[in-house]
Image (spheres, grey):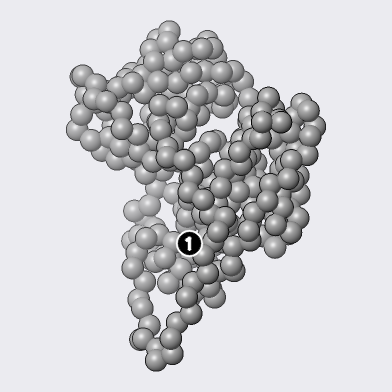
Amino acid sequence: VAVFDPAVIGARDRDSSRERTDDASAVMPLPFEPVGLLFSEDGRLAAAWGTGPQVALLDATRFELLREVAVPKSVEEAAALRPVVFEPEVLRVACFPSRALMPVRFIVPPPPAPALPAAAAVSQLEGNPAPTAAPSTAPAAAPSPVLAAAPPPAPSASVHPSAAPSLAPAAPGGRLVGQLTGRVELVEAVVLYGPGSIVQERTRVTPDGGAWSAPLPVPGTYRIVPLGNGSRPLRARPNFLTVTVGDDGLGQLDFEILGLP
């Protein structure tokens, strides 16, 4: 989930703006490809859902993933989940096709610190050290722990979409190499976005049957996505791969094509 904060974007200097590949001020990586968002009334929380039984709870003020919603055994055959409404410390999630309404309880995280000046917000959101104020003589209050902020499962490029670079094995010939299985007839192209961008297309290749191969791009971090006719998204396992390209080729960049959304 990409965040575009006008205050942060407007505070950037011209040189840093020219060097960027997109305008996102922050990114919240998710363990699946989101297709929609539901916000709480105060805008502090958001629930993202995917094409299947996938829901994640987000802190929309700190740009953090709080937890991925686990499907209980009673509705483990659910084909899809849709968040319906935020209530105090409860998110109601509808399960389809059973139409059961599942309560997801959480602890509301403490409110964020007072807003920083725009220049300091740029530093904090984009990973630059912000200038610190002179130390105060008064003791600082201890931060309140966020009890519900369970860490997400470790990403694995081979089994589900990952926002962390995958550790793909080397491939000969200085190329990116992968294999498509499942409904490969739906794939029109395998597209590389980057470097360091989820919206800038670097190159696209047409698979040969179930195999695809692309020349090694310049070093950097890339997202790889299989797309259908007219650049239509497809249901795939994983939905996308994120790889760090260096001087060597990468192999086993594989996708199982499940069908249309």
Which percent across, then down, holds residue 148?
A: 57, 55
- Going by the numbered disc 1, the residue's amino acid type is Ile
Classify residue 206 by image quadrant: top left
Q: Is the C terminus in the top left, top right, bottom left or bottom right quadrant?
A: top right
Q: Vertical placement of 77 versus 152: above or below? A: above
Q: Vertical placement of 142 versus 169: above or below? A: below
Q: Vertical placement of 186 versus 163: above or below? A: above
Residue at the bottom extreme of this rendering: 137
Q: Nearer the viewer, residue 124 or 150?
A: 150
Residue at the front extreme of this rendering: 73
Q: Left of 172 or right of it: where is 198? A: right
Q: Left of 15 or right of it: where is 41? A: right
Which percent across, then down, holds residue 15?
A: 33, 61
Q: Nearer the viewer, residue 32 or 210?
A: 32
Q: How crowded is mark 1: few (under 14 residues within 10 Å), some or many (20 or more)?
A: some
Q: Left of 34 or right of it: where is 174? A: left
Residue at x 36% of width, y 78% of height = 132
Which percent across, then down, holds residue 159?
A: 45, 27
Q: Name the residue under label 1.
A: 9
Q: Vertical placement of 185 versus 108: above or below? A: above
What kind of element bears circle 1?
A: helix
Which percent across, then down, holds residue 182?
A: 51, 12
Task: Decide if residue 193 is in sight here.
Answer: no
Residue at x 48% of width, y 18% of height = 256
